[in-house]
Image (cartoon, coloured by chain):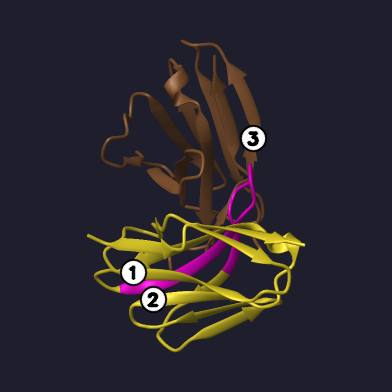
């Protein structure tokens, strides 16, 4: 069974304190790994797609990396507006259509 | 990015009534849409896959008679919660992708359903 595990569940950071979020996966065959940001009471907002080990994507203070077993979302010098829940999802070879399997998410709080 | 619009954003209904939630892809056609349910401080749980022109595919444990899905066009899928009960209160979110190949999914803004 495909599994996606995110850690930590929650992360409290001071503004400017860089950190990394982990998404480890055990899947039959990875077709893509996706990172989303979700604000309270809103739908997830797409951030990155990673397809193969060694791939990296960047957007402002966020950088996503991928290995054969896990992905990291690095937050560099975070600001309070980076506070959100970050969700990792995978799409596998076995999954019908564009079905995604989500991890439990990491709730990030950045204090000024 | 692509836009997926969900309506309403929130709804309150009485026990025993039915509620319809709409999900529209505004700038692309989506042959497949997905419906999720999210409980507080938890991740998204896939309920069903909505297929344009055919029956929806439900995940294990999801009652198809309780959660009716209709994908009548390439830009609209609806989820109807029938005979709602307080335990159906939740945050419901839809998603759609531009194509059938491996592309990112875009999500609606979600619908907060409260059954009283």
Q: Colour of chain B?
A: brown
The residue located at (40%, 29%) in the rendering is B67
Please say whether residue B50 is visible from this viewpoint.
no
Task: Give SS at disc 3.
Answer: strand
Spot the residue most to the right: A112
Tag 1 near tag 2, CB within 8 Å: yes
Q: Which residue is mark 2?
A: A70
Task: Give the mark, 1 or 2, whose residue is nearer the N terminus.
Answer: 1
Tag 1 near tag 3, CB within 8 Å: no
Quadrant for residue B5, please give it: top right
- Circle nearer the viewer, 2 or 3: 2
On screen, residue B89 versus residue A84, left or right, reads: left
Q: Colour of chain A?
A: yellow
Rendered image: mark on residue A25: 1
Q: Which residues are magenta?
A: A30-47
Please say whether residue A22 is visible from this viewpoint.
yes
Q: Which residue is mark 3?
A: B7
Foreground of the two, B62 or B86: B86
Dominant SS type (magenta):
strand
For the N terminus of chain B, the image quarter is bottom right
Task: Give SS at disc 2.
Answer: strand
């Amino acid at each position: 069974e495909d599994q996606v595990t995110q850690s930590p569940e929650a992360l409290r950071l001071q503004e400017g304190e860089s950190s990394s979020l982990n998404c480890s996966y055990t899947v039959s065959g990875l077709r893509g790994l996706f990172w989303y940001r979700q604000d309270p009471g809103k739908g997830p907002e797409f951030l990155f797609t990673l397809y193969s080990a060694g791939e990296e994507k960047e957007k402002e203070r966020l950088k996503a990396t991928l290995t054969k077993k896990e992905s990291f979302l690095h937050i560099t010098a975070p600001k309070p507006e980076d506070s959100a829940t970050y969700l990792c999802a995978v799409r596998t070879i076995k999954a019908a259509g564009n079905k995604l399997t989500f991890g439990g998410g990491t709730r990030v709080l950045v204090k000024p | 990015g692509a836009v997926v619009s969900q309506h309403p954003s929130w709804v309150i209904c009485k026990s025993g009534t039915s509620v319809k939630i709409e999900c529209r892809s505004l700038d692309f056609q989506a042959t497949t849409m997905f419906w999720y349910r999210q409980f507080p401080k938890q991740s998204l749980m896939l309920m069903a896959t909505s297929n344009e022109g055919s029956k929806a595919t439900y995940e294990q444990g999801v009652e198809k008679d309780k959660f009716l899905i209709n994908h009548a066009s390439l830009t609209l899928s609806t989820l109807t919660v029938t005979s709602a009960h307080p335990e159906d209160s939740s945050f419901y979110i839809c998603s759609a992708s531009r194509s059938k190949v491996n592309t990112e999914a875009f999500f609606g803004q979600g619908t907060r359903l409260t059954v009283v």
